[in-house]
Amino acid sequence: MRRFRIVAGLAAVAVLALGVTAPAVPAAAKKKVEVLAHVNPGVGANADVFAHRGHAYLGSWIGNGCLSSGVRIYDLKKPRSPRHVGTFADAAAEPDLAGTWTEKVIVRRVNSRAFVGDLAVTSIQACSTSSSAFRGFGLYDVSDPSNPERLALVATEPQTRGSHEIYMQRKGNRAYVYTAIISSEHLTSPDGVTPGNPDFRIYDVSNPRSPAQVGAWGAWAELGVHPMDGPPGLNRNHVHSVIVDGNARRAYLSYWDLGTVILDITDPTDPEFLGRTTFQPGEVGNAHSAWLAKGGKILVETHESFGAPGSPSVGVPTFWDISNPMSPIKLSTFSRPDLIDLGETVHDPKVRGNTLFLSWYQEGVVVLDIARPSAPKLLTQFVPPASFVNPDWSLCVGAPPCSSIWGVFLHRNYVLASDEAQGLWVLRFK
């Protein structure tokens, strides 16, 4: 989720940046960054990135103009020369999706009775809450990435904005979609006293042409925690995003000011509450995203919170021992003044082995050694050069042009980073 702040007087100047070296990092940093490629789709704000079988999937964001750019697919056979091969969920090809944005996309290989191939799911949100635009998520056959085929659209209630963040996982010969419908319990409540439809929902998509909701969970109905509970300014107990483990046994719900809620989803029709992370009184909440490390024993929790440069209110990653999911133990946070001098919050985490990659908006990609989660260490940082003034994206801290890394994804031996203003970066950390 991105905050909205308008910067006027933008002009479009497209410049392709290639072969840029990493910026200076502290002396303790051991690793270097090699830029393999940069692809700039041009105007239209970009969102998250995912990769599957040698292809990158670049989502789009609402930006200033809501161009409904959909999900762009790039062939990474030659990582130094990504090639755009397809697009789906865009208004140009699918007019019924005009007025929407596709923030999140996940792709999995599915082998069920009803479908064999590469299945993509993308969140679809209405740019305006007052519009009649579609809201929900879409399922696409991307077995041939150059010819994606829409299989189904799943609509959410008109009171909601749609599926915000989304995840998909296989379980045996079945496939499930797990999605966050922000503030659904509150927005669909008939009277403000009775819980509405849960924020977290599970869909069986084994037959992606006929998906079906099979499970759901909400803190209001299950724990008695009202979405508006808490002091003024912290009244946001809603599911922002979700991930599940590789066996689809546990789900981790980033529940904003309620922390990260851990559910047992062994039976997807009956999710069971196990435990959650917590915030101390006065501590900034905003549990935004999560990732697992150390075989699922460590949870990396990121908080999205903007503040004055150097302020403790700026969101940073937090590390939890969840060996006992019923009683998570806070191990550490990672915060360095030289990384938050712009007042920029961390965004999304990804882990490979003992290395954590964080998308950190205008701080770029921040890489940490988490061999000891109680004492994470900075390895290096990549801040893309700002060379393109994007009229559909105007959230620079300071004067444009600027770059802002939304998402990061690890694929084969390189790292993909999505840039809200400037598109897709293909990197190698060596």
Image: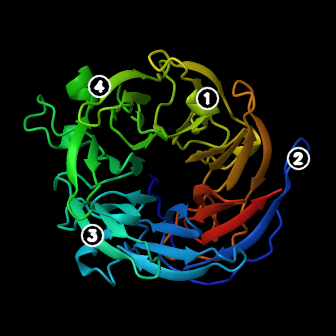
Q: Do the residues labelled 1 and 3 touch (CB within 8 Å)?
A: no
Disc 3 element:
strand
Give the image location of residue 325, x and y in percent. 47, 21
Disc 1 element:
strand
Give the image location of residue 146, x and y in percent. 46, 82
Q: Which of marks 2 and 4 is nearer the N terminus?
A: 2
From the viewer's perspective, is the residue at label 1 or at label 4 nearer?
1
Does residue 399 appear left or right of residue 326 in this picture?
A: right
Label 1: how many residues lie within 10 Å, few (<14), some (14-19) or many (20+)? many
Q: Are marks 2 and 4 in contact (CB under 8 Å)?
A: no
Q: Are marks 1 and 4 in contact (CB under 8 Å)?
A: no
Q: Nearer the viewer, residue 221 or 371?
A: 371
- Name the residue beneath numbered marker 3: 151
Does residue 281 appear left or right of residue 236 in this picture?
A: right
Give the image location of residue 31, x and y in percent. 85, 51
The number of numbered badges drawn on the structure is 4
Residue at 58% over, 25% down:
320
Answer yes or no: is residue 230 visible.
Answer: no
Q: How far apart are marks 1 and 2 (CA)?
A: 22 Å
Image-quadrant location for residue 422: bottom right
Vertical comparison of 7 with 315: above or below:
below
Residue at 54% over, 23% down:
322
Mark 3 is on which residue type? Answer: Leu
From the viewer's perspective, is the residue at label 1 or at label 3 nearer?
3
Find residue 229 and name its label. 4
Q: Quadrant of the C terminus?
A: bottom right
Mark 1 is on which residue type? Answer: Phe
From the viewer's perspective, is the residue at label 3 or at label 2 nearer?
3
Q: Which of marks 3 and 2 is nearer the N terminus?
A: 2
